């Protein structure tokens, strides 16, 4: 055998990236990771991407397969190259290219017409999360403000609002975070409806670090996700029953006396007195009361530290019979015997028992909630209940504990500085809307608002950063009933999406590789600068509104280039940008705040909550009308064991996978090679019952819609559940689309808290084999 | 002693994300179907006792490479540093190496009519850098290092962890090592 030295041979597989310029930017689709990327550019072309480092955190640089595929995405065949005016029917995909001048004239005319007909509010801007860089994300809302139009809240219709509502109820804040590095302080870590191995690769390394140091990893998911595949224990729960599992766990924990009464007395609403007659807290003046068991009297909760509040009991105070909030919780919890919990969740009783005991006794244990469990009707309950479960074990505000939702870097609330919420960047001019203000409507009310024309009609809908049709509930309803009611639809997008096909005017938007922008990811500021020239005639969102502002006589509010806006906004000498030097930033692409604290942080260390009482509140007076004053399990709206289940017995999940962030990253050949078309995951038992084999084409259907895809039979999914990667666009389907299956049903309890959350996983279907025509 | 490169992959850390596969293609400007590096997902068991293993696959830089033996024109060489290299200019496109490799690690490029495969990015290694499949791995599950240096990270891991090599029955003596529990 020859044994040559490398120097004698030379090339090998070669390095086509030799001689590339390396330019730093930051990835801004909504996976929330905001990874720093290094673009390799040669002859003005983006060839490849590498992970960029974060000064101060050598462990933190990251890149995923989606980020790696950007060069194919940027130059993809589906890029919109020119402003496109519709010439065919909506949805037909027939457009003619027009100049920007023509596009601006048309837009100005349509906006003026709408303003004159139904007033400024009839000009509406719907934006999602396709690009979360500062100027990109702000621009549509800023423009809406400048013209006094309408905007829509995003979180409800995107199916992520349940988490915020649940935590808001209990913690008084929508987010609760534990730095990823804090997992190694957990004896047990429960990833509940969360699959970071696919969705947040930058979190997974810390989970694996913890596991390799001895943290037991539990994943609760109807599917054996990539994360579940790496876990010590997988609990294949029946979809939508997570709240019942947590209540059952609490019952086991409390009945075995494994809870933390003193923690609950000191830090939660548990000892607060609740009136038996109306369920309200018993108050004197404004103060909630507790029962001092030492002196046998009710005293204000604010003075509880000086006495011995009772956790349980019933008394009559000022002639009013009352009991503790903890006893009210117990009433609900005691409904969930081990047998009943097992029956609802479909899990083995001994597995539930083991999890409950290990969670309470492996101190501390952590729960990391994922959006997967809150994409249901009554979506506020799962996050509300996990926070309550953590509280009864005294894990809230504890390193290695918590029931958290975000991790990120070292900041507690994704804010520049813990506890500081704004005013840190120089946004005075950027926030000047010329005295106008948009009216925000609830995104989950958009369909009804447009259908009814109430409280006012929408004459022009501008859709930005969103493949609305692909990702919003009940696509057939949108196509047949909602879009036809909107006289003029604008879609601003880098790509000719399904939604763009229904627009009257499509505007070509730069990707973040082609524009100036930035992300404030304290203690870093990450710059986006044009790594490559714009593709086609693309403009940034901000540049589009700047052009339009000239036609509408508000150019004084849109008077800067993107670069100058970024430079002005970053010219703050406040802490977040103190010492930032523009020239250095353009060289390195990243600014690190001097004296930044890189230590891992977590929420509620001070055990102060932004609830009305300042304590952790699992008891909510607001939800009394719904019988949900304590965390309560309700079956799914579309319950496989209910009436609809007889016709449509399978729960349909559209899960977030490694390939896409929502519908972004479709059409990249490297990713298409990993999965070339959508398929539906089914348990072989469900396949066999329907005569379906691996790779057969099948029809998923219900009364709302259908799609035809390949079946993939896997033991890694609970029988009775079928699942498909979400994000696939209609061109990949033989027929139909998965989003025609889903529903949007107003939920009274959620409306009382905030707004309805799209129950994307609260969806029943049936599946049948499609016979191949010969 | 000369260097002898080996790749160590911690199966306890591979999340099956395919970033290595995409990084390899992108950084070598390969087409989508040129799988020099890929991950196979292996599901075993019956619900609910199911396991899934993610198995990263690429050329194992075997000590006894069957591709080398099969090449009729000696286009494949094993370097002193342990890397098995296809000398593209000598390759006649006969595809015997493709059939001979028991791991399916050699990818035939029908456009250029040449065989191609992973060579641990030997150019980068010699320049003191790691391959993109290593630098782009989100969980740092893999690394290439000198098996002859007892202080190297790969040697340390092999000394302290359980490991296996892919399909040892072929007698190829692979230089990729899978760390197990």
Image (tube, rainbow, N blue to C red):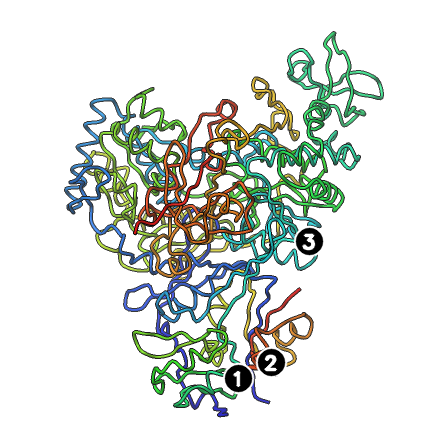
- Chain containing mark 1: B
Q: Are marks 3 and 1 in contact (CB under 8 Å)?
A: no
A381 or A455, nearer to the observer: A381
* Residue A692 point in image, percent of width and height: 45, 48
State how far apart marks 3 and 1 are (Cα).
38 Å
Seen in the picture, residue A379 relative to A34 is either above or below; the reply is: above
SS under mark 1: loop
| Whether marks 2 and 3 lie on the same chain | no
- Chain containing mark 2: B
Task: Tell me the residue at 42%/88% (across/down).
Answer: A9
Residue at mark 1: B82
Task: Tell me the residue at 47%/91% (across/down).
Answer: A4
Residue at mark 3: A215
N-terminal-most mark, 2 or 1? 1
A347 or B179, nearer to the observer: A347
Seen in the picture, residue A694 relative to A439 is either above or below; the reply is: below
Q: Is residue A417 left or right of residue A334?
A: left
Residue at mark 2: B147
* Residue A52 point in image, percent of width and height: 46, 61
Task: Classify 10 Å Cα crowding around label 2: few (below 14), some (14-19), many (20 and above).
Answer: many
SS under mark 2: loop
State how far apart marks 2 and 1 are (Cα).
10 Å
User: Would residue A133 be seen by someone viewing this image from the given angle?
Assistant: no
B151 or A626, nearer to the observer: A626
């Amino acid at each position: 055998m020859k044994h040559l030295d490398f120097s004698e041979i030379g090339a090998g597989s070669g390095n086509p990236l030799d001689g590339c310029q390396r330019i730093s930017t930051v990835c801004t689709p909504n996976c929330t990771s905001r990874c720093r990327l290094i673009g390799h550019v040669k002859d003005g072309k983006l060839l490849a991407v590498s992970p960029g480092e974060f000064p101060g955190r050598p462990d933190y640089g990251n890149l995923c397969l989606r980020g790696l595929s950007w060069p194919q995405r940027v130059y993809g065949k589906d890029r919109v190259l020119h402003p496109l005016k519709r010439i065919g029917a909506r949805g037909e995909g027939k457009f003619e290219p027009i100049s920007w001048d023509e596009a601006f004239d048309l837009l100005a005319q349509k906006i003026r017409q709408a303003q004159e007909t139904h007033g400024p509010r009839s000009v509406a801007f719907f934006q999602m999360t396709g690009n979360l860089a500062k100027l990109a994300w702000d621009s549509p809302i800023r423009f809406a403000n400048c013209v006094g139009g309408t905007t829509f809240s995003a979180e409800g219709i995107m199916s992520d609002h349940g988490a915020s509502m649940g935590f808001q109820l209990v913690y008084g804040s929508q987010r609760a975070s534990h730095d990823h590095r804090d997992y190694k302080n957990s004896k047990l870590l429960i990833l509940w409806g969360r699959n970071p191995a696919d969705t947040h690769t930058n979190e997974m390394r810390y989970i694996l670090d913890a596991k390799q140091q001895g943290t037991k990893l539990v994943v609760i998911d109807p599917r054996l996700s990539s994360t579940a595949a790496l876990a010590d224990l997988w609990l294949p729960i029946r979809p939508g029953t997570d709240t019942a599992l947590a209540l059952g766990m609490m019952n086991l924990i409390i009945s075995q006396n494994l809870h933390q009464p003193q923690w609950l007395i000191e830090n939660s609403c548990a000892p607060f007195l609740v009136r038996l007659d109306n369920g309200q807290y018993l108050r004197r003046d404004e103060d909630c009361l507790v029962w001092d068991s030492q002196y046998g009297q009710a005293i204000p909760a604010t003075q509880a530290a000086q006495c011995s509040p009772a956790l349980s009991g019933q008394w009559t105070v000022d002639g009013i019979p009352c009991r503790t909030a903890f006893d009210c919780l117990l009433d609900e919890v005691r409904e969930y015997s081990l047998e009943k919990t097992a029956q609802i969740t479909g899990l083995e009783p001994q597995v539930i028992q083991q999890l409950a005991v290990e969670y309470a006794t492996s101190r501390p244990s952590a729960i990391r909630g994922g959006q997967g469990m809150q994409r249901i009707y009554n979506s506020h309950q799962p996050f509300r209940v996990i926070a309550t479960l953590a509280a009864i074990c005294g894990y809230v505000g504890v390193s290695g504990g918590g029931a958290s939702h975000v991790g990120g870097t070292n900041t507690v609330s994704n804010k520049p500085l813990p506890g500081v919420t704004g005013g840190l960047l120089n946004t005075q001019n950027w926030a000047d809307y010329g005295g106008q203000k948009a009216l925000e409507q609830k995104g989950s009310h958009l369909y009804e608002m447009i259908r009814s024309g109430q409280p006012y009609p929408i004459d022009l809908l501008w859709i930005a950063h969103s493949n609305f049709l692909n990702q919003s509930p009940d696509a057939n309803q949108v196509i047949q009933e909602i879009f036809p009611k909107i006289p003029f639809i604008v879609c601003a997008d880098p790509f000719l999406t399904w939604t763009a096909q229904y627009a009257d005017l499509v505007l070509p938007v730069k990707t973040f590789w082609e524009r100036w922008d930035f992300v404030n990811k304290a203690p870093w500021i990450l710059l986006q600068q044009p790594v490559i020239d714009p593709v086609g005639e693309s403009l940034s969102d901000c540049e589009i509104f700047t052009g339009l502002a000239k036609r509408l006589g508000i150019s004084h509010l849109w008077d800067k280039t993107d670069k100058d806006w970024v430079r002005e906004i970053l010219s703050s000498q406040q802490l977040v940008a103190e010492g930032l030097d523009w020239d250095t930033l353009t060289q390195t692409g990243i600014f690190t705040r001097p004296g930044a604290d890189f230590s891992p942080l977590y929420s509620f260390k001070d055990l102060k909550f932004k609830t009305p009482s300042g304590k952790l509140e699992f008891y909510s007076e607001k939800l009394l009308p719904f019988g949900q004053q304590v965390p309560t399990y309700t079956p799914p709206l579309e319950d496989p064991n209910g009436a609809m289940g007889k016709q449509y017995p399978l729960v349909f999940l559209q899960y977030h996978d490694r390939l896409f962030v929502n519908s972004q990253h479709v059409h990249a050949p490297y990713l298409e090679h990993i999965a070339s078309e959508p398929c539906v995951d089914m348990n072989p038992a469900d396949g066999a019952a329907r005569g379906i084999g691996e790779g057969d084409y099948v029809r998923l259907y219900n009364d709302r819609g259908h799609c035809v895809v390949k079946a993939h039979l896997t033991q890694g999914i609970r029988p009775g559940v079928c699942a498909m990667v979400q994000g696939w666009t209609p061109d990949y389907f033989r027929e139909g689309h998965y989003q025609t299956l889903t529903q949007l049903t107003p939920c009274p309890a959620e409306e009382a808290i905030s707004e309805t959350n799209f129950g994307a996983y609260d969806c029943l279907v049936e599946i049948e084999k499609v016979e191949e025509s010969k | 002693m000369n260097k002898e490169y080996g790749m160590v992959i911690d199966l306890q850390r591979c999340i099956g994300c395919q970033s290595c596969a995409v990084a390899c293609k992108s950084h070598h400007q390969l087409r989508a179907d040129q799988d020099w590096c890929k991950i196979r997902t292996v599901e075993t068991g019956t619900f609910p006792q199911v396991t899934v293993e993610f198995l990263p696959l690429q050329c194992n830089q075997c000590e006894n490479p069957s591709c080398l033996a099969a090449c009729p024109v000696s286009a494949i060489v094993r370097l002193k540093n342990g890397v098995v290299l296809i000398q593209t200019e000598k390759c006649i496109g006969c595809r015997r190496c493709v059939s001979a490799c028991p791991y399916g690690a050699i990818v035939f490029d029908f456009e250029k009519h040449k065989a191609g495969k992973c060579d641990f990015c030997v150019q980068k290694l010699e320049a003191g850098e790691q391959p993109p499949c290593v630098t782009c791995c989100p969980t740092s599950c893999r690394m290439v290092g000198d098996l002859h240096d007892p202080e190297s990270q790969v040697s340390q891991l092999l000394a302290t962890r359980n490991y296996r090599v892919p399909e040892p029955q072929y007698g190829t003596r692979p230089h990729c090592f899978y760390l197990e529990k």
